[in-house]
Amino acid sequence: MTNPLRVAVFGSGPAGFYAVDELLKQEGGTIAVDLFDRLPTPYGLVRGGVAPDHQKIKAVIRQYEKIAARPGFRFFGNVTFGKDITMDEVLAHYHQVLFTTGAESDRRMGIPGEDLPGSYPATIFVGWYNGHPDYRDLQFDLSNVKQVAVIGNGNVAMDVVRVVGRSVDTLAKTDIAEYALNVLRKSTVQDVYLLGRRGGAQAAFTNPEIRELAELDEEGTDLVVRGDEVEPDEVNRQFLTEHRDEPTHQRNIDTLLGQIPKGEGHQAKKLRARFFVSPVEVLGTDRVEGLRLEKNRLIRDDKGNYKAQGTGVYEEIPCQMVFRSIGYKGHPLPDVPFDERDGIIPNREGRVLDSSSKAVVPRVYVAGWIKRGPSGVIGTNKPDSVATVEVMLADAAQAQSANGLQADAEAVPALLAQKNVQAVTFSGWKRIDQVEITDGKKIGKPREKLTTIAELLAAAQGS
């Protein structure tokens, strides 16, 4: 193995940090890792995607701080790949490069009316209420909205439903952006629809998430379900029998069935969890006015897969705002192969493949959602990153000496300085962190995020 092995990692979310951890704990050789992010702040979706009312999940950041304290680690925030540093420059200064840039863009529904004002990808709303610099200037007005529809029932959809549906007093004790809290204070929303194309047994949400919705009656919001959409028919019972070794499916059904006797409940606001419905059109002329839904049923195809099948029966529901959350894909990066259909960087066991020839691209690797697609939870990225690092180390052990490689530790900082890129170190991030925590304490929150690049860079410099 070339000693020291210098590795560049782009993307400082969970997959990036788990890869850094695995690289830096190797014995028998010196490995130096530079972790890059286009934002001045690290942690990716843990900071910008996890819902503000799920502070315990964000505690994983403490693990990442320990990783960042390891010898051989450097952080370069506010550095955009392809703009501030190119692929050619990266390969000239590092033995290997790993991309862990996630899957941030939403998949489209492809139905009429999808682009009407009031129809949005869920992720931009999530970014907005989490104070992400890309989305902080967006305008959401809930003061004239009575019904909101959230399409999908995965983690992001559940987060959006909770943030719109729960008590503002509860959210005021989280790290939600203050401007978002002010918008939610003026909300007139009475009904929030959670729409799934299959049933509660096949839903992507976890049991704690649906139970959390059922407990919001303590905050003035009832979870309302329909017996005809929740009580299992023969096909659904067959599904539950075949998946009895995965108890989440039955637990979800049990939780939903427990809501039926409560009917409409007694609170002013309702979360209406609907199942076996697919949107076929967003209704409205100048802006969103409603949704046209097709009712589905669960079928088992010839290959044994359980699928939603349209019945040709339609209904319309009123809503003035729609958030779609039906899947995610990665962004293409300059000079990096990309699979447009699957929204990932094409790879074989983490080795990046040329888009046309399918040949391995030397010294270039991928991990996380941009490698495998958006699946699993935060911890799922750890074994994925470890598997890619094992491949990287095996390749490094077989590599010939890298002729012409400018692997001097100060070469990249000098290159960025020459380009007038204000790179943020991990010490700079800790200064940002302290400012946010201090500002949050003043108003009873765990932190008040800085939400513009200018504010973040000023805090990083201590000014």
Image (cartoon, rainbow, N blue to C red):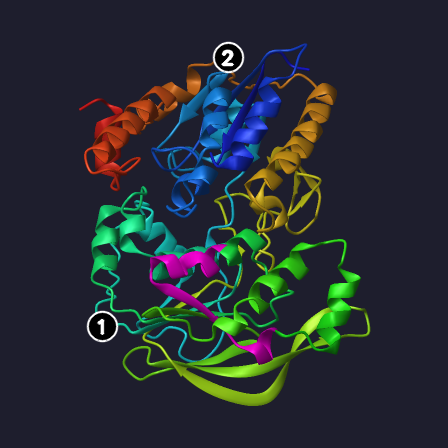
Camera-nearest residue between 326 and 311: 311
Rendering quarter of residue 447: top left
**What residue span does the magenta drawing correspond to?**
212-230
Q: For mark 2, does the 10 Å Cα neighbourhood hold few (<14), some (14 to 19), or many (20 or more) residues?
A: few
Q: Residue drawn 64% across and 58% down?
A: 251
Q: Residue drawn 34% across and 75% down?
A: 116
| Sequence-first disc among 2 and 1 | 2
Rendering quarter of residue 161: bottom left
Q: Which residue is mark 2?
A: 71
Q: Residue drawn 38% across and 47% down?
A: 53
Residue type, label 1: Asn
**Is 326 on the left or on the right of 118, as rendered?**
right
Q: Residue drawn 43% across and 44% down?
A: 54
The spot of residue 356 in percent (x, y) is 66, 52
Rendering quarter of residue 402: top right
Query: Does residue 61 show up?
Result: yes
Classify 290 as above or below 138.
Answer: below
Q: Which residue is mark 1?
A: 144
- The image quadrant where one finds the C terminus is top left
